[in-house]
Amino acid sequence: MYLFIINPRSGGGAGRRIWHTVQALLAARAVPYEALFTQSAASAENQVSQALARREDWRAAIVVGGDGTIHSVLGALRRRGVPLGVIPAGSGNDTARGFSIPLAPEAALDTALQEHCIEADLISATGGLTLTAVASGFDAQVAVNVNGSRYKRLCNAIGAGRLAYIIGVLHTLMTFKPCRVSVTCDGKEQAFDQAWLVSVCNLPSYGGGLLICPQAESGDGLLDVCVVHGVSRGQLLRLFPTVVKGSHTKLPYVTMLRGRSVAVHFAQPRHAIGDGEALGTAPLAVACEPGALRVLSPLAAAPAVAAGAAGSCRAGG
């Protein structure tokens, strides 16, 4: 039995539309399932926990939604040991990208039903678990601005989630002021003046495919950190096109770090987000939880699985 977790409002209504497609496919294939519609991110974990507790034979929990919906149920899946499947229906879909899950609904469903599974790390923080990245500073402020904007809804409606992020960058650039930050990675502290952002990544991208930490691997037991510092507004604006390809890592005002635990202390209050969802304000401390989640992914069928140990998926197996 599969549990489908649907956020009908994700991606500006894409969740509802995509679920209708998936529902028809499941009926045609006579796949046994239960459908759970989430009411809000705040209540989703409790809803999913209750659903998973009703029976022991769940083959997987498959999210029809975006990165925020996935974020809201990570704790429940980890506690029950149920594998995560994803049918992308958000504005960014960076979880799907990170695990090579197709963006097309039928192909994503095929991936989930094949039950090829890899072990993935999670990022643990005071505010909960995160799968893609914990960002603080400028890019977190961009996410806060985008999530509260009208242009996000408009961009989602035309299937241009990345465009909303680009608009958000320009919007935030006009008001954000950099400050000093201290970053402690595996006990080694480094300070950076005029820091714009600190991103701690488990997967390579966020913001709809921006490769902030292109070397990040979800199953290596390590977190990748990107610090952008000592750069003018004009230079920062020119930086963002390079993030699309991940070539920013070679720039002199970008410092890349790697470790199992990371603490970030800004000199001024800064927003922090995980999987695009608010985690409060920095300072923050995060740690890697190796192999804490199993994910249904085409990467498991590859000859060499860099993202983690591979095998067939069964809850608790």
Image: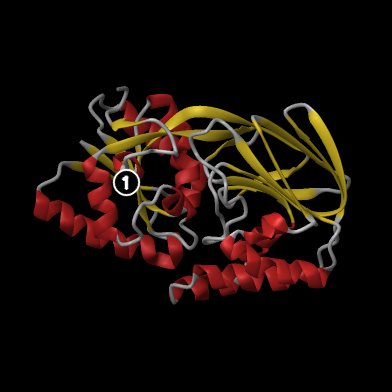
Q: Residue at x 37, y 35 (%)?
A: 118
Q: Residues within 10 Å of mark 1 (few under 14, many from 20)?
A: many
Q: Is residue 262 left or right of residue 79?
A: right
Which one is in front, 68 or 252?
Answer: 252
Q: Residue at x 71, y 66 (%)?
A: 239
Which one is in front, 166 or 8?
Answer: 166
Check disc 1 and give the amino acid type: Pro
Q: Residue at x 50, y 50 (%)?
A: 68
Residue 266 % position (x, y): 84, 45
Q: Is residue 123 left or right of residue 102?
A: right
Residue 53 % position (x, y): 33, 26
Residue 125 seen in this snapshot:
yes
Where 33 falls versus 159 (above or below)? above
Quarter of the image holding residue 283?
top right
Residue at label 1? 298
Where 144 falls versus 152 (above or below)? above
